[in-house]
Image (cartoon, rainbow, N blue to C red):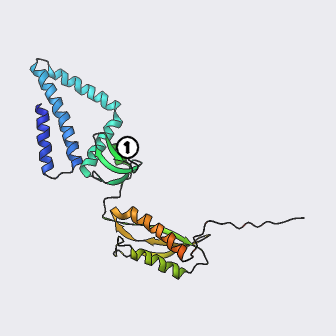
Amino acid sequence: MIIGIITRVVERLLRKTRMDNMLVNFVTSIMYALLLLFVIVASLDQLGVDTSSLIAIVGAAGLAIGLSLQDSLKNFAAGVLLVVFRPFREGDFVEAGGVTGVVESITIFSTVMRTGDNREVIVPNGPIYGGVITNYSKRSTRRVDMVFGVGYDADLLQVKALLQTIISEDPRILAEPEPVIAVSELADSSVNFIVRPWVKTEDYWKVLWDTTEKVKLRFDEANVSIPFPQMDVHIQKQD
């Protein structure tokens, strides 16, 4: 009961400091486990049990368990580092440990993430901290990279003007940095335009999908063809 009261008081104090919820939960869970271990040893000592030998046994058992649970200890250490250095926060959209999703919480040994189709994925902390972490929510703005191909018979100036009109009409696209619209490649079957506007991070996917749809509709209205891969086959006849 006392441990529960102390833990709740510390939790309230930490939350008043506006500390990250993820960090508060992590610290209080560690604190609860350590205090519980202390109470168990103190209680046995009051009952007349020789705790010195017990502590030695616990230490030896801890060493044996530590050797057998090396991966778990790695995950624990990685969890501490994740909480201390905070490469991401609760609610961030990240790609880490081979999973892409929203961070729900960081526990002692693992991180709980929610994928785009609302699956809950529990990822060990070791692979997350030991690998590449991509935090899509860290910056306030993102660049939308799009590529649109047109036929070689298309009027490039007309196509560029259409793309500029589509971009300028969208209020979600930022004026600074200035959007980039340019011919990037003379491909095998098409002339490829790159379209790279900047948007707020929360508007990224909507702008990507809406712009792709608008380009197809505007190209159809202007009779601008979007070619598909083609191959010319030459048949040689022999007598």
Farthest residue, direction top: 48
Q: In which quarter of the image is the N terminus?
A: top left
Q: Residue at x 21, y 38 (%)?
A: 30
Decide if residue 218 is in sight here.
yes
Instruction: Work out whether 23 lies above or below 177.
Output: above
Q: Residue lying furthest front in this view?
A: 221
Give x and y (percent) for residue 170: 38, 73
Q: Residue at x 35, y 74 (%)?
A: 177
Q: Can residue 184 be seen in this view?
A: no
Q: Position of residue 129 (x, y in %)?
A: 34, 48
Rendered position, 22 above or below 234: above
Question: Which one is in front, 36 or 140?
Answer: 140
Q: Is residue 39 left or right of residue 108?
A: left
Query: For the residue marked with disc 1, what is the amino acid?
Result: Val
Q: Is residue 31 above or below residue 216?
A: above
The residue lying at 30 percent from left, 44 percent from top is 78
Q: In which quarter of the view is residue 234 placed? A: bottom right
129 sits left or right of 182 in the view:
left
Q: In the rendered image, which quarter contains the C terminus?
A: bottom right
Look at the numbered disc 1 and give the secondary structure of its residue. Answer: strand
Q: Residue at x 57, y 70 (%)?
A: 226
Location of residue 23 in the rendering, given as x and y in whole percent from the top left corner: 22, 47
Up the image or down, 229 lies above or below 179; here it is above
- Neighbourhood count class around disc 1 (C-alpha, 10 Å): few under 14, some 14–19, many 20 upward: some
Q: In which quarter of the image is residue 188?
A: bottom right
Horizontal side of 196 relative to 108 (left or right) equals: right
- The residue singled out by tag 1 in the image is 121
